[in-house]
Structure formats: C-alpha cells, structure tokens
Amino acid sequence: MESRRYLLKFYYIGRKKFHGSQRQKNLLTIEECLINALNEKKYIKDVKTSGFEVASRTDRFVSARAAAFSFITTKKPILMEINSELPKEIGIWACSKVKIDFLSRFNAIYRHYKYIIPEPLDNIQKNSKVFDLNLIRKACKQLEGKHDFINFSKPGKEEEKTVRDMDSVKVSINNDFLVFDFKSRAFLRQQIRRMVKKILELGKGEIEYDDFLKLFDVSKQFLYQPADPSGLILWDIKFDDNIKFEVDIKSKKRMETYFLNQELKFGLKKQLFRILQGDDFS
C-alpha cells in the first residue's frame, strides 16, 4: 500500500508518572506512549523512518486538550485501535490526511494555551492586601504584540531567538477561578508560566506596574521561578483551514467519559475536605 501522512489530535493529562511530552531516555513520556501504541498496532515499524513529529512540546505536569502529531503509515489510522494501547490519561480523538512532506510543528498557524490559577479567586482576594483585576487586564494588553520575551522565559542558549509575536492575551473568571488565554504562533520555554507569575504578582500588589514594564528591558536580567505547571493546558493548535479533521465519535466519547469520571472523583474529594473544615460536632 501507498505510504501516507496523517495528522492526529490528542489529549493528555500531566500526571506525575509522565516526564513531560518529549521523548527522554529511560523515562516515561507522552511521546513514548504514543510511539509504543503505534508500534504495537503495526502502524509504524521504526520511529526514525516513520516521520513521527509532534506540533508542540510541554513540560512535566502540563496537560493538553488538542495537541497534535503526525506520522507516515501504510494503514489508515483506526483511532480506537490505537487508543486501546494507551493509558486513559492519553487519547487520540481526531484525524486528517495531510501531504507527505507536512510538518506538524512548522505548519501550525498558532498555539492556544490556557492557564488556570490553582487558587479560587475568592481566596486570593481574602489573602491579598489588594487585588486589582483591572491592572491584570492592563498587563495582559501590554504583553500583546511583538516583544523580546527573554525575561519571560527560561534561560537558555545565548543564540536562541527570543522575540515572539503575541496574538492575544486574555483573562476571564470561570467558576471563581482566574483563567488566562494565550495565543501565539510559538512560545519560549516556560514563557506562559513566567508571564502568569508576574501578572499575578502585579495584581496582588507584590510588584508595581513599573516593575512589570522593566521585564521588557533586555539589557537587564531577572531571575525568578515560574508559576506551577499543573495549571497549564495546551488547549488547541490551529492549522490551515484546508486541513479538515474527522472526529472519531467513540474516541471523543472515551475522552469525555474519562474527564467526567475525574471531575466526579475530585469533586467528591473537594466536598470531603470542605466538610472536614466544619466544627459542628453535635
């Protein structure tokens, strides 16, 4: 049969057992699970000749709703067949045939990330001397456009290009949680988590707006820890409109059922600890 390249969308939950998305020697990763499943079901023989490529990489504890990868095979992918070899924390749910020379990473138009602040807004407001949501929105607007984000990224190689064009940065409130949305063609390592860290410090009054603006000064270096990775979600990767994804109903149901079961499981734990804080012993 003729070899074809397929582009697939998939989700994953950043559990502790996964050491990020990118392959690492002797460590369990998201990519490793995908490759093993493709091997097991005879879609590929060798990863080096399969053209396997993911569109975006994420750190440990980061999750994804619509990540993407592509590979070359002579078999049309049956998603539930591949999913049967994957842990429930990982699942493929849509597929599209693409050109044989398609590059998942470089053909992406933009990437959309969400960051959920792990603490309820009500708690943040109670525990902070001040909390200025308008100032947070102002900072989000400041981050939009083309900037050198070297002070909002993990220090790396000196020759690495650190200028990025941020399409949009938005903040909203969802069920008493602050949710940030970031869209850009490409992000630097830890860029979102570091932007969130400083935006939140600004909103809490821990730094002044002038201090926030100084981070755009590339002649100065600022060292600080990024925000918790567990709040970060790779929400979607946008490709050309000519690429039409076919959603597999059973695979999507598998994903939604897993999400619902996890919501119920952790919802019970949340209610349990809420009740345990009470002092009614009558």
Image: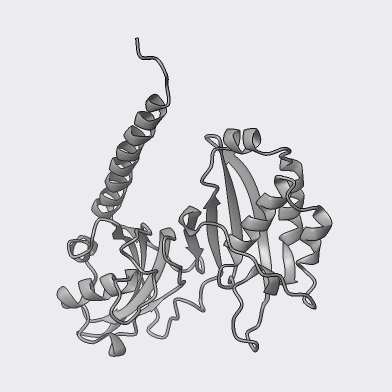
Residue 45 location in percent, x, y? Answer: 20, 85
In this view, the residue farthest toward the top is 282
Nearer the observer, 63 or 76: 63
- Apparent side of residue 202 relative to residue 63 in the rendered image (left or right): right
- Apparent side of residue 248 relative to residue 67 in the rendered image (left or right): left
The quarter of the image holding the N terminus is: bottom left
The quarter of the image holding the C terminus is: top left
Q: How is the image coloured?
A: one colour
| Rendered residue at 69%/51% (across/down) | 201
| Rendered residue at 56%/58% (across/down) | 227
Residue 70 location in percent, x, y? Answer: 36, 75
Please tell me how many numbered marks the rendered image carries: 0
Nearer the observer, 181 or 189: 189
Nearer the observer, 231 or 88: 231
Residue 26 vs 119, above or below: the answer is below
Does residue 136 appear anywhere in the picture?
no
- Apparent side of residue 157 relative to residue 95 in the rendered image (left or right): right
Residue 47 location in percent, x, y? Answer: 28, 85
| Rendered residue at 59%/64% (across/down) | 225
| Rendered residue at 53%/54% (across/down) | 114
Does residue 40 appear anywhere in the picture?
yes
- Apparent side of residue 68 relative to residue 150 in the rendered image (left or right): left
The answer to which image quadrant residue 281 occupies is: top left
Residue 53 location in percent, x, y? Answer: 38, 79
Nearer the observer, 33 or 7: 33
